Image (cartoon, rainbow, N blue to C red):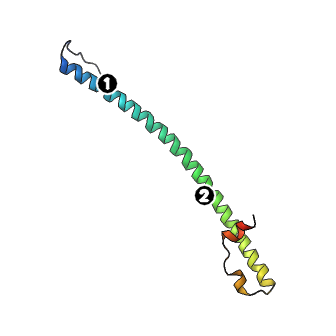
C-alpha cells in the first residue's frame, strides 16, 4: 500500500498506526492458521491409523470369540457359560 501521510496530521497518523496494527494482527492470525492446519493434518493421519488398528483388533476379538464359542460347544458345556463374548473376555487373557 502506497500513500503519503501528511506530516503532523494526527488523524492520518492514527489511521496509519491502526493500519499497521491490523496488518500485524492479520499476519499473526495467518501464521496461526497455517500451524493449526499442519496440526490437523497430523492428527487426521494418526486418527486414520488408529481406525485401521481398531478394525484389526475388533476382527481379532471376533475371531477369538468364535473360537472360544466353538471350544465351549465342543466340550458340551451349557450355553450359559458362553453368554457374552466381548472385548473384556479377550483382553482379560492378555
Q: Which mark is residue 77?
A: none
User: Which element carries disc 2, helix, strand or loop?
Assistant: helix
Q: Is 30 located above or below residue 4 in the figure?
A: below
User: Which element carries disc 1, helix, strand or loop?
Assistant: helix
Q: Quadrant of residue 5?
A: top left
Horizontal relation, residue 20 to residue 31: left or right: left
Residue 90 in the image, given as x and y percentages of width and height: 71, 69
| Mark 1 residue crowding within 10 angstroms, few (<14) / some (14–19) / many (20+) | few
Mark 2 and mark 1 in contact (Cβ < 8 Å)? no
Horizontal relation, residue 92 to residue 22: left or right: right
Residue with the most extreme top position: 7
Residue matched to label 2: 51
Residue 79 in the image, given as x and y percentages of width and height: 71, 86
Q: Is 19 located above or below residue 88 in the figure?
A: above
Residue 13 in the image, given as x and y percentages of width and height: 23, 19
Quadrant in the picture for the N terminus: top left
Residue with the most extreme front position: 92
Tell which circle, 1 or 2, labels the residue nearer the N-terminal end: 1
Residue 22 in the image, given as x and y percentages of width and height: 31, 29
> Disc 1 and disc 2: Cα gap in Å?
46 Å
Residue at the location (67% across, 61% down)?
A: 56
Q: Quadrant of residue 11?
A: top left
Q: Nearer the viewer, mark 1 or mark 2?
A: 1
Residue matched to label 1: 20
Quadrant in the picture for the C terminus: bottom right
Horizontal relation, residue 93 to residue 13: left or right: right
Amino acid at each position: 500500500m502506497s500513500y503519503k501521510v501528511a506530516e503532523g496530521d494526527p488523524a492520518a497518523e492514527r489511521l496509519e498506526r491502526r493500519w499497521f496494527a491490523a496488518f500485524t494482527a492479520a499476519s499473526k492470525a495467518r501464521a496461526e492458521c497455517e500451524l493449526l492446519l499442519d496440526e490437523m493434518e497430523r492428527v487426521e493421519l494418526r486418527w486414520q491409523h488408529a481406525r485401521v488398528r481398531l478394525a484389526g483388533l475388533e476382527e481379532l476379538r471376533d475371531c477369538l470369540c468364535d473360537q472360544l464359542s466353538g471350544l465351549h460347544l465342543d466340550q458340551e458345556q451349557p450355553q450359559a457359560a458362553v453368554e457374552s463374548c466381548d472385548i473384556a473376555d479377550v483382553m482379560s487373557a492378555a
